[in-house]
Image (cartoon, rainbow, N blue to C red):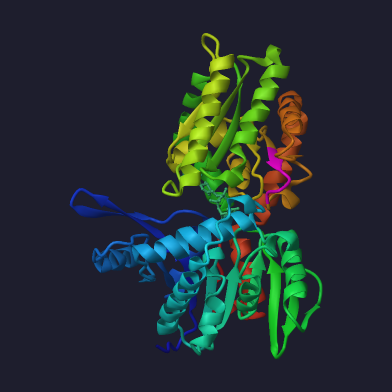
Amino acid sequence: MENDSRKLIIASNRLPFILERDGGSWKLLPGSGGLVTALAPVLRDRGGIWIGWPGLSGTADISGQISRASDEAGFDMKPVYLDAEDVRRYYKGLSNEVLWPLFHDLQSYCNFDPSYWQSYLDINARFAGVIGEQAGSGDFIWVHDYHLLATGSEIRKAGISASTGFFLHIPFPPLDIFAKLPWRSEILRSMLDYDLIGFQTPRDRRNFIQCLRTFVDDIAIVGKGQVIEARAGEKTIRIGYFPISIDYTEFSQLAGSREVADAAWFIHEDIPKGKIVLGVDRLDYTKGIPYRLRAFEDFLEKHPELHRKITLVQVVVPSRRDIPVYEELKIEIERMVGEINGRFTRSGWVPIHYIFRSLSRPELLGYYRAAEIALLTPLKDGMNLVAKEYCASNIERSGVLILSEFAGAAPQMKKEAILVNPYNIEQVSDAIFQAWTMDLRERRSRMEKLQASVARNDIYWWVNSYLKASLAGALDDFPTVST
Ligand code: GDG
């Protein structure tokens, strides 16, 4: 279908809404998160399109719900349907049992089942088919994340000539780890069919380039700076890094609201004398929660004088629960929390408050605002938006951020955060003590710099810099997104 005006087509594994059964009918919840916030206005203004899986594998007819979601969002959404076998092989299989653990350097979690690959290619081709029905030659197709690494080549095979970009939200692994992937050359060659490939950090791009040099013949890398070029045969591919961010203004405004101030007050009321150390993570083995609990235990062992004065609040948001390893992780976390609390709890003080559910936005910001220390120690993370959200919500400007050096956010925050190796239990324990003893002047100075940096490089900056790199100066073809 050709369209006269140039439009933006977004493709991601999931469409930006959540559909839930509510008795006999459907409940439609709008999508949340930075990507939706940033891209929805662009799509709305230009009549753009979002393509993705609605999240259900049954045979229920949900076309009415998709139309309703489109009407409410103000832009078109087009579904890519998956059946139960597709979900098992493409989504749970290749995406979440191979690419997710491998790209986070955790190859022992991988299941390289040979039957997954063909399904992954088939679904990527199905995405390309739906994209092809929508794209005119002047459009820009922006594909997101590890589920769709091969969609670029399927788009080319389908003869679609529109310009394409890809953004990887998770890390790209070092050569020695990527080399274990049975389909390593196929994946790299597919990625080279995109016109622009974006990573979160220079580290990810460096790893990717090294893999290209090793596994792809006749590749030349030219240029330097944020966006460089790879030449492969006739084709030139731009390769850049674009650290994703948050809507800083939205977070800081909501954090400053009465509702959030009240929530923060009630949270601290329950923990009156002490400081709150906060961890917020999806349930995922990449987030390093068991190591973090060990580090907090080490801290409690070493600092009996601080018992009753410090409480760890660990929020774990349910995720991927039908994958057995996630359920095992939940059991492990709950066992550890029980053990540590059993050992250290005294009348009127429980050292770890453990929350296993999704919080509402104002409640989440209440925790951000109430916490004197954020303890975010993923074993590896594409970015870690929670670190940026914590800073934006720190209205008192006195919080301390302890951050894993393996989070994509670390290069941007390394001077003002306390960086730690999440595997080094004693170092993390010492960092909690350092944060506890840091004087107000230093805390304020660090937090102000962190806030300024997140505010400067916010989600709108991210969208703009990506589109600029992809369109080479034709960004004005899309409306500028402004806060
Ligand atoms: C992937 C990459 C990369 C968390 N708890 C609640 C809640 N959240 C929201 C946070 C934040 C998001 O979830 C988590 O974002 P992260 O960046 O920390 O992690 P992933 O989900 O693993 O995301 C990651 C990201 O993509 C973007 O490129 O940074 O590295 O793994 O926005 O606010 N939201 C609500 N209640 C909760 O309880 N409402």
Quarter occupied by the N terminus: bottom left
Q: Position of residue 98 (x, y in %)?
A: 56, 59
Instruction: Write down the quadrant of residue 149 in the picture.
Output: bottom right
Residue 344: in magenta span: no
Instruction: Write down the quadrant of residue 69 in the picture.
Output: bottom left
What stretch of residues is rendered in magenta? 402-407
Vertical arrangement, residue 195 with respect to residue 174, above or below? below
Q: Position of residue 414 (x, y in %)?
A: 76, 46
Does residue 127 show up?
yes
Q: Residue at the location (54% across, 17% down)? A: 342
Q: Residue at the location (64% across, 54% down)? A: 107
Q: Position of residue 32 (x, y in %)?
A: 45, 54
Residue occupying the far left of the picture:
24
- Residue 247 relative to residue 398: left or right: left
Residue occupying the far front of the picture:
114
Quarter occupied by the C terminus: bottom right
Residue occupying the far top of the picture:
347
Vertical arrangement, residue 483 with respect to residue 233, above or below? above
Vertical arrangement, residue 413 with respect to residue 475, above or below? above
Q: Position of residue 22 (x, y in %)?
A: 24, 49
- Residue 30 relative to residue 215: left or right: left
Does residue 395 show up?
no
Vertical arrangement, residue 406 with respect to residue 474, above or below? above
